[in-house]
Image (cartoon, rainbow, N blue to C red):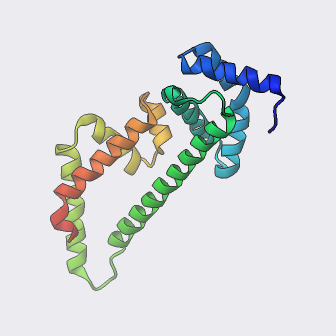
Amino acid sequence: MSFSQEEREAESALLTRVKESDRDAFELLFQKYYAMLYRVVFYKLRDQGLAEDIAQDAFLKFWVHRDRIKPELSFFPYVEKMARNLVLDHFKRENVRTKHRDHVQRLVDVPPGKPDEAVQLGQLEGRIRQVVVHDLPDKCRTIFLLSRVEGLSNPEIAEALSISRKTVENQLYNALKVLRKKCAVHLR
């Protein structure tokens, strides 16, 4: 993407204003580049809702870190790199979820003729239920159940509970940490 000198100077002026916390300048950058960033992210993910979330998160991250802006540099490559990193983070989380799901599925698929493993699995499931009900804080329990029992995605949970996706991720992380600690004896 090449700009004329005049366009480059106008963008640099906008970036200087954003660095000074000018919301109107940020809005102008958002309006100018959001659709383009969305298309780049959608091309990588092929998921409309997730692409929208990541493109918006990239702009939000840009705003949060506006004090680091270098107005002499082009805006779009900077925000595109932020989005690309968010996409990579998404794929890493999905990889961890898949591994977790596969591990749980292996625990559930007890081969016939191994009744002791079935008993151990039953004990583990009972302990997990007990920990979820008695040891997780209300908000954490709700998010965990929506994710693991109802099968909702993090963006769906965030929207349903009117909280940020990051809050959902943090609560799920905390729930799993508590479960690992409280169920450690059953996982050996």
User: Eyeballing the image, is 155 above or below 9?
Assistant: below
**Residue drawn 37% across the image and 72% down it:** 106
**Residue drawn 66% across the image and 33% down it:** 73
**Residue drawn 23% across the image and 66% down it:** 122
| Residue 141 point in image, percent of width and height | 28, 41
User: Eyeballing the image, is 134 above or below 17?
Assistant: below
| Residue 178 point in image, percent of width and height | 22, 50
Q: Quadrant of residue 100?
A: bottom left
Is residue 149 among what the camera can see? no
Numbered label tally: 0
| Residue 146 point in image, percent of width and height | 39, 43
**Residue drawn 73% across the image and 36% down it:** 36
Tell me the quadrant of the picture where the N terminus can be found. top right
Name the one closer to the observer, 146 or 184: 184
Q: Is residue 8 left or right of residue 171?
A: right
Name the one closer to the observer, 29 or 46: 29
Is residue 182 among what the camera can see? yes
User: Eyeballing the image, is 126 above or below 56?
Assistant: below
Name the one closer to the observer, 52 or 58: 58
Name the one closer to the observer, 144 or 17: 17
Q: Is residue 149 left or right of residue 125?
A: right
Tell me the quadrant of the picture where the C terminus can be found. bottom left
Single out the residue that lies furthest toward the bottom.
Answer: 113
